[in-house]
Image: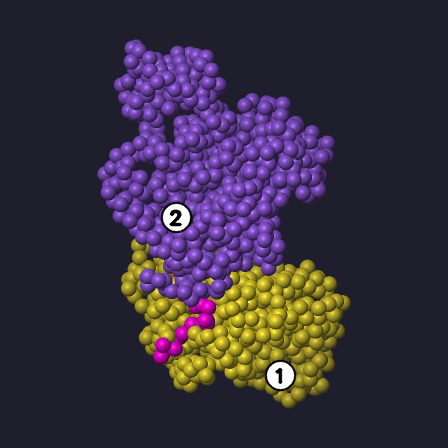
Chain colours: A yellow, B purple
Amino acid sequence: MIHHAWLRPGMWAGRRVRIVGDGLEVVREEAARAGFVPGDPADLVLAIEDVGTGPEGFRLGRRNGGIAVSAGAPAGLLYGFFEVLRRGERPIGADEEHRPARERRMLDHWDNVDVHPVMGQVERGYSGGSLFWSPGRDIGRVRDYARLLAATGINAITVNNVNVHAAETRLLTERLDEVAAIADVVRPFGIRVHLSVNFAAPMVAGGLSSADPLDDVVREWWKEATARVLGLIPDFGGYLVKADSEGQPGPFEYRRTHADGANMLAEALEPYGAVVHWRAFVYDHRQDWRDRSTDRARAAYDHFAPLDGQFRDNVILQVKHGPMDFQVREPLSPILLGMPRTRLATELQITQEYTGQQRHVCYLAPMWTGVLTGTDLVAVSNAGDDPFWTGHPLAQANLYAFGRLAWNPALTAEQVLDEWIGLTFPRAREILHDLMDDSWRTYERYTAPLGVGWMVRPGHHYGPDVDGYEYTPWGTYHFADRDGIGVDRTRATGTGFTGQYPEPWASLYESRDSCPDELLLFFHHVPYTHVLQSGVTVIQHIYDTRFAGAARVAAMRLRWRDADGLVEAGVHERVAERLDEQLRSAEEWRDQVNTYFLRKSGIPDRHGRRIF
Amino acid sequence: MIHHAWLRPGMWAGRRVRIVGDGLEVVREEAARAGFVPGDPADLVLAIEDVGTGPEGFRLGRRNGGIAVSAGAPAGLLYGFFEVLRRGERPIGADEEHRPARERRMLDHWDNVDVHPVMGQVERGYSGGSLFWSPGRDIGRVRDYARLLAATGINAITVNNVNVHAAETRLLTERLDEVAAIADVVRPFGIRVHLSVNFAAPMVAGGLSSADPLDDVVREWWKEATARVLGLIPDFGGYLVKADSEGQPGPFEYRRTHADGANMLAEALEPYGAVVHWRAFVYDHRQDWRDRSTDRARAAYDHFAPLDGQFRDNVILQVKHGPMDFQVREPLSPILLGMPRTRLATELQITQEYTGQQRHVCYLAPMWTGVLTGTDLVAVSNAGDDPFWTGHPLAQANLYAFGRLAWNPALTAEQVLDEWIGLTFPRAREILHDLMDDSWRTYERYTAPLGVGWMVRPGHHYGPDVDGYEYTPWGTYHFADRDGIGVDRTRATGTGFTGQYPEPWASLYESRDSCPDELLLFFHHVPYTHVLQSGVTVIQHIYDTRFAGAARVAAMRLRWRDADGLVEAGVHERVAERLDEQLRSAEEWRDQVNTYFLRKSGIPDRHGRRIF
């Protein structure tokens, strides 16, 4: 059985609906699915009218004792209908106008066609196989997924991994019909399909001898390939490219800039109103840990800021929210504040690669609301063909929250969570708030401290390994020694990364005294005896928070017992299993991190708790 | 082109041979291959005669101006012929009697039928695919391999991995003909085939509901399976079993002892004169690093010593030479000194899992000669379908040396190496001695210090990761903190492991003062400032040896240039590439280990060399 997530059928059973307008087949189906029956006088009127809210907006109010939704287009009406479902019994008062804050609200899927023997089918996926590409794929399931996404406000998806391997390169060419089949299924829900493409596709799939973006033959190849795509998928959204990154090909090979590369694709897509998402995740992944002059945190800004203003209008530079890679705590990427003449998208990671891999409860929206800057939003999906969609049933909330925040960034993380709980597990509302409200900070408390990141096991990135990345080529170091820890990224004595920020951040981060505690070790190397703004020393903070974090998980695990009978048995059991593992893992984190720092610092816990 | 290794064809071109006796087809072929032509008066006479040297021995001397070899059986005559080839131009004087010190001289192959996506086909193999099971297997290559082995004195091989997966379990049953085909090829070279079997084979391959060694149905199944094997392979050598180890099934599941398990198989094999090799490598691989009461080094002795005297006569308990797992330096396993009423075999590892993976030059015989105790000898092969047989051409020497030492443990490592060089790369004799004589100690100098082991990257075991195994379930810890390092295995204050040794070793290892420097950290936790018998402190020893080890590799790399033109171009190039990598890796080891301990101890190098 597939879990219904936030769209339970029959919620409005027996209510009467009137639907006015053409092209509203999906709206009719969705209304029927929710339990509405056609009838008059209607409890709900859904009508196409020119209400001036744009192609996706709608108006919501009451008319003749019923609820009325009006929109200029089917997509807007569908969004309005889903807003009605979300409201449930909560009152709708005066006439409301709704429209999305952002034109494009996008999910990237790191799904492969082939199944990797170790990584599985979805890179950094923890929810089973790919919804799009698994061998026994159920196209009805893709439709259900599209419905769920539309009900959060998502209107664009990339259907394959940014690391575009051999089989996936051909989605652009021979296997394009498979992409078109997905587009056909998701289109009625207002969702456009994008494709991750291999920068070397002209060579890999096209047989050319070059992928040089300034080579006319290459440009022509992309134009022709793009024309074929748009011929089959008229509302095709565009390309996503990871170039010159972690071994992927890119323009550097031809001594061209990333603007050259992105603009070539943009030119091919421009006639169709489609876009290029070009990732800014470019750094030296073969760094030598002995080289203290290179700082991975600087890399994206150093590569891209000089190109500001050189990208075509339909290029969107897609920037991870932090300068490293989706750690539990990072400062905002300085690119997001430093390229005023470039269209930007902030990339978030819903799939919990570094935040517990959907074995830990970790509601991420409080992190995200801290990094929203007004750019476009894109996020890496956490969904798969798992019956609960997201492996951990409570990880659904992250998928839901991303869509809602992309539509309306003024919502708070708490509001969105409450909405999701109300739609999904309404009888366990208090319990779920207890478990989830603070779960991101809880996860932070038992893992890497004070913004330093990267204490995970290399490769799979689950569980603690304090020195795991310390002597690797990945540029991911904490420099802990017997006296102190942290990365000096100041202008005065360090890598100068703080200088990539405009004021007031540049000065805020530059000084140990003003740098926020939670980012202190990201920006500064300090002694273990350094006193934080919180009043405790770094070493005592490490001990205190590790103990507190693990204790909190133990309490969460007990609390979940109260939900027995308040959620479906299958959900209760799955969450209970995951909480068992979360507690085991949190205690492992607590003990490894504490032991590591006790061994290194020699400073005992002032409360005398057990450190192994 | 396949490298000829230590059997170059045509070495004796034009000499005359006379061969007297029946069943000597292989002897004739080998003589012809070496360049001999039949003729009289003969430079070499090979004759079957009853000379009282047993089935594998031979007499060697001069008669009528030529060399004369006499043996009671074809196998002995073949060994005698290979001895002649080995002698080359070195004089043969008075009549010599040769016979092997050990009846069984055995290689284990960790070869799988299936190819693992990450590990490849040969577990811990660094020499390409399996000679026996790779899809394009060349049976002629198997014959060449058998010839090479016979020329070192090997007379038994296990043809599949001790971790017996699904496909390999069926080598005992449906796929037995594939094993028989190998046996047919190697038999003329005096080599018997053994098979690794899955303890749960009665269930996996036989469909029974149990593998309980005291269950009559199970015992009957093994008897019938064994009868079928011997029906097809009349000289079948026996079974090799890894039970209750690293996830493999075993008798513990049925609350039976390992004697129960081994004796069941021994009983089935006994009528045919075949044996069970039962591995003593049993330990808790899901240990909790927080548990300081468990010591993996103790495990094998704790499990097996109480069973001494309970094994049937045709059970051979196969014991890794050290108590851990083939680290570059370990003490002798106490089992090898503590089970007088049990047949024992010492297991060595030719494949360089923890000693540079055939990317580093590491001639292992000096380690082996230090752990030979008079038991049978078994070793894990390093050969594969690589054109040089062993990945690194110089790693051939380890394969050669094992066979020679198994035949004659009185040989020194230097003698054997000189033999191998003389047969293989005679024009580069001095250069190869320079590179290889001390290469094991060189490897030790830049890797984990003073016997503590386990500073490799988890999983693949290549390259440094000082804390890589420190907080894992594998029982492999060094306990380094800011003050000191090492594992306290004393009776007085530690795990009591030293008490598993008889005197004088028990006392020798128990005391810091008498414990040999090279094993100090295996047995003791000491401060970095502890002064070694060598007169330097532990920390300074770490620095000094890391610098010396890496510098030695740099010198080896330069020295190899002198061999250009003295060995085949392909060999020169392959070794040069590997030396480049060895130097890169040795410098990485030097710098990571030094930095790790400088960060932890805070004690600078007294010579002020660069530590990052």
Expressed as whole percent of the image width and height from the top left, the position of residue B320 reads 52, 41
Q: Is residue A486 magenta?
A: yes
Q: Is residue B437 visible?
A: yes
Q: B349 or B532, which is in the foreground?
A: B532
**Residue at label 2?**
B443
Identify the residue at horizontal 30%, vertical 47% (top origin).
B556
Residue segment shown in magenta = A472-493
- What's the residue at 32%, 49% (across, down)? B553
Looking at the rendered structure, the kind of residue marked 1 is: Leu
Q: Callout 2: 10 Å neighbours few (<14), some, many (20+)?
A: many
Q: Decide which of B457, A14 is in the foreground and name it.
A: B457
Disc 2 is attached to a residue of which chain? B
Seen in the picture, residue B235 relative to A262 is either above or below; the reply is above
Horizontal and vertical percent position of residue A565: 76, 67
Q: Position of residue A457 (x, y in %)?
A: 51, 60
Identify the image quadrant of the C terminus of chain A. bottom right
- The residue that disc 1 covers is A60
Q: Is residue A458 visible?
A: no
